[in-house]
Amino acid sequence: MSNTPFYINLTEQVLSYKNQSFYDLVQQQCGDVVVEIMQLQDISSVECLLEVGDIFAFLNLDSNELIQIKKKAGIFLNNGSYVLKTGILYKVQTFINILNELSRKHVNYSDRQSSNESCNLTVPEELVEKLPFIQTLITYSSLVVNSKADFTLLNILLSNMFRNLGIADKGFRYESIVRQFATALYVLGGRSAYEFLRLNIPGLLPSVQILQAAISATENNLTEGKFNYEGACNYFNSIQATLGFIAEDATAVIPKITYGTTSDTFVGFALPLDNCGLPINNTYSTKSFNIFEEWCSNTPKAKLLTAHLIQPLSHSSSPSPYLFSAYGTDNKYKSIDVLSRWHRIYQEYKANGIRILGFSTDCDSRYLQAMRASLGFFAQFAYQDHPDLLNIDIPRSWSWFFIQSEQLYICFQDPIHICTKLRNRLLSETATLLLGNQLINMDPLMDLINNYSKLDHGLVCSDVNPKDRQNYNSAAKISNDNILILLKNITNSFGLNIYLQAIQSVRLAYIDKNTDIIERIYYAWVSVFIFRSWLVWIDSKDKKDLDLIISQLLNLDLNDTKKKYQVKRQYFITYQSYFCVEINAHSLIYLATLVCEGKLPFEALNISLQNSQTCEGMFRSARAISSITSAGVNFTILQFLKRANKLRALQNIKNSSHENHLRFPQHHKLAKTNQVTSTGQDKNALSKKSIENAVLKAYKYVSNLFSQMNLKALLRKGQFISIDEMSNIVLSSLDDFWSSDLGTINSETGSNEIDSENEINNEDQSNVVYDSDEEFELNDHLNVSDDINVSSYQGIRLFDNVKQELAHSYFKVSVNNENKYLNKQAACWILEKDKTSLSSNRLSRVQGR
C-alpha cells in the first residue's frame, strides 16, 4: 500500500475516529511505524492525539524496550545521540496540523449553529412575494435536509438560472452540466418541447441555436461516406475494449438531394464505390451550377442508406454500439465489393489495435456469397496465407463440422432475419413445404386459434398471417413452448411442429440473452440437423414422387401440380435460409473452440450482441427522435446524419452520467436484460468435449423426432442413420450444389438458385411532413453580405454579394447578364423535378407477395 498522504480527503468526520478506525487513518496518512508508536503510548483516538501533541517525546526515555521502535523511526549517531527520520516527522506534524484545523472549523461551525438557532433567518418580503416557493422551502427545510434525494443537479440548475437573471444585460452563461442537461432534453423531447420549457423558465436553458452549434462542433461527427475509425477507436479505448463485431445493414430513405453546409457536398446521390468496396466521399462537391445540374439529370438518387456499426465485446454486459459510417446507395453492388470492404475495415481496425471478430448482415444473397468466401464454406477461401489467421484443432470425430480450421474472422447472418424468412416460407404462394406425408403450412395454427381459448395460445390471426413480413414478434409467438405443446393435439401438425421447433431453436441459440453457451450450441445444431434431415429426404426422392404426394394431399390434378412446382426446392426452405442456419452454427462452434483453446477471451461468446440488429436499432432511434409536430417518421440521408449526430451527443452524455448527475429513464424490459451476464456460462464448463456432447445431444433429439415419421431415406435397418453417414450425404449434396458456381462472387444480385421470399419496397408518393427542426435551410446566415443587395426572381433569393467565409455555400450564376449568388440548397429546390417521398406506413413498404 502506498504511504502517500491523502490529506485533501480528510473531513470533519475523522475527528470522531477511535480504536481501529483511528489506527487505519494513521496508517494511511503516516505509515506503520507511527501507528506502532501510538499503540505503545495507548493513543487510540483523534481527540487523544490532539491532547498529547508531541508523540515522539517518549522516545527520549532510556529503555531497552524502545530500542527496536527507535531503530525504525530514526538513526543512532556515533556520538550516542538519536535523530528522528525527517519524513516521519514531517508526516506526523502535517497530519496533526490538519486535524487541528479541522477541529477549529468544527468549533466555529458549532458556534454559528448555536447562533442561528437563537435567531430567525430574515428574507426580504418582496422576494417571497415574487418567489413564493422560498417560503415553502423554509417551511419544509428539515425534510429537505434529511431527504435521501440527490439535489445536486437541481442546485446547479437553479444557481445557474438565478445567476443568469442577475446578468441578463451581459448575456447568459451556462455551466457544462446545464449544457449537457439541455442537450439531452433537446434530443429526447424534440425542439417544440425544449422551446416550450425554455420560454417559460427564463435563464434556465440555452437557445436551440447554441445546442445545434455545439452538436455540430462535436469531434468525430458523422459525414456521408466517411469511415470514422478514429472516433470508434477512441470509444473503445474509453471502455477498455479490444474486441469488436461489425454490423452492416441498409434501410429505405426519402430519395431527395440536399446540401450539407458542413461538408460542402450534395447529399442524396448514390455514392460510387472504389476498388475496396468503400464509398468515395466528397464525390458530389462542386462550385459549378452546370455540373450540379448535370448530376441531377444523369446521376441516380440513393434509395437506401447503408450503415456500419461496431459492437464492443467487453466485460460490460451491454456496451453501446458505435456508428462509424453511413452513406447512400442505389443497391447496385457485387459480392466482391462486400468482401473487399470487409477486408479493408478489418485492416483499418487492426492498425488501431482493435481485433474484429466477425461481421453480421441480413440475409441478402450477396452478403451470403461474401460470407461463404470469407469462411471458405463451399467456396474458395478469400484469405489464404493472411498473417492474422485464427486456427483451431478440429477433432477427427467432428464429421458434422464443414468449415476449415483457419479463419480470419467469423460471420453471422442476422438471426431475426432468419426467423422471419423461415416464417415467410410458410406463407409463400410459390412453395409448399413437404416433409414425408406432412404438409407444413399455417392450417394447424388456424385450427388452434378457432378451437382453443386465446388464454391457452395467445395468438391472433395476424400472428399467423402477418401483413408485415419482417415482423419478428409473430415468428416468436408461433414458435413458443405453449404452441408446440398444443399442436400435439391437432391432426396433421407434426411436420409443422418440427418446423416451428427449428425456428424456436434459432431464437434460443442466437437471440435469447439468457441462454448459456453450451445450450446455444445445442439449439443451433438442433436447427441444423432438422434441415439436414429434411434435405436428405428431399434429395432421396424423385420430383415425380414428390408431385404425387402433393397432389394427393391437396386433391390437385397431377399435371397441374407439375406445372405449379417446377423444381424440388419448392418443397423445401430456401437454400439462402438453409445456408444462413449452417453458417451461424459453424461460426458458433468455431468461436467456442477458440475460447476453450485459450485463443480468445470469454467475452467473445457474447453471442446475443453479434448480429445486425444494432443497425436496426440505430434506424429505429433515428426515426423516433422526430418532433411531435412532424407526421414523418422517415428521413433523407442528410436528416439521418443529423439525427445520428444528435444520438451520439446523447450517448456521450449518458456515458458521463456518473459525473454529470443525470439520470435517464430505462424501459423495464431493458432493465431486466441488462442484469443478465454477458456470456451466462461457467468458463470451466466449456471444452471440446462439452461442445461435442452438445452437438451429439442435438442429433439424438432430432433423430428421435424424425424416427416417428418413418422416412425410409433416413433409416438403416430400422434405425436412424448415424451422424457420420448423414454428414457425408449432406457434404456431398452441398458440394454438388455449389460446384456449378451458380452464385458467382462477382454477381450483382446473387445466385438465382439461392431464392428467397420476395419482400418488395413500394415507394408510395404520399406527402411527408418534415420535422421543422431539420427542414432544409435556404440560408441560416441572414447577414450574407456586408452590403446586402437582394434580388427576387420568381420567389428565389439571389444575392449580389456574399461574405467570403460563406461563398462556398453559393453558386455564382449569371441572370440576365448579371452575376448573382444562388444558395446551393435553393439550387436543389430549383432542380427538383418531382416530390419524392417514402410512405410513413411501413406495412406498405414491406409486404409479401
Image (cartoon, rainbow, N blue to C red):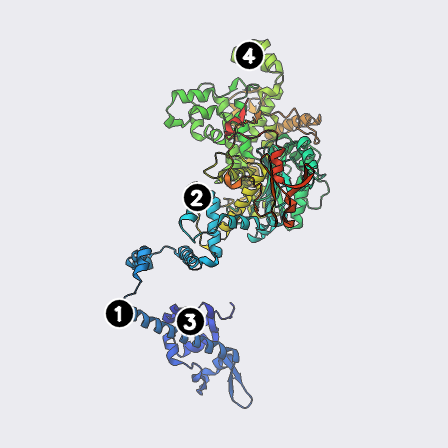
Disc 1 marks a residue whose amino acid type is Ser
Q: Marks 4 and 2, how far apart in space?
A: 63 Å
Q: Marks 1 and 4, how far apart in space?
A: 101 Å
Q: Marks 2 and 3, how far apart in space?
A: 56 Å
Q: Which residue is mark 4?
A: 551
Q: Residues within 10 Å of mark 3 (few under 14, many from 20)?
A: many
Where is residue 472? Give x, y as percent.
50, 31
Disc 3 marks a residue whose amino acid type is Tyr
Foreground of the two, 153 or 338: 153
Q: Secondary structure at mark 2?
A: helix
Query: Who comes first in sequence, dot 3 or dot 1?
Result: 3
Mark in the foreground, 1 or 4: 1
Q: Can you see residue 316?
A: no
Foreground of the two, 340 or 844: 844
Q: Marks 3 and 4, how far apart in space?
A: 91 Å
Q: Residues within 10 Å of mark 2 (few under 14, many from 20)?
A: some
Q: Which residue is mark 1?
A: 118
| Above-or-below relation of 360 to 711 | below
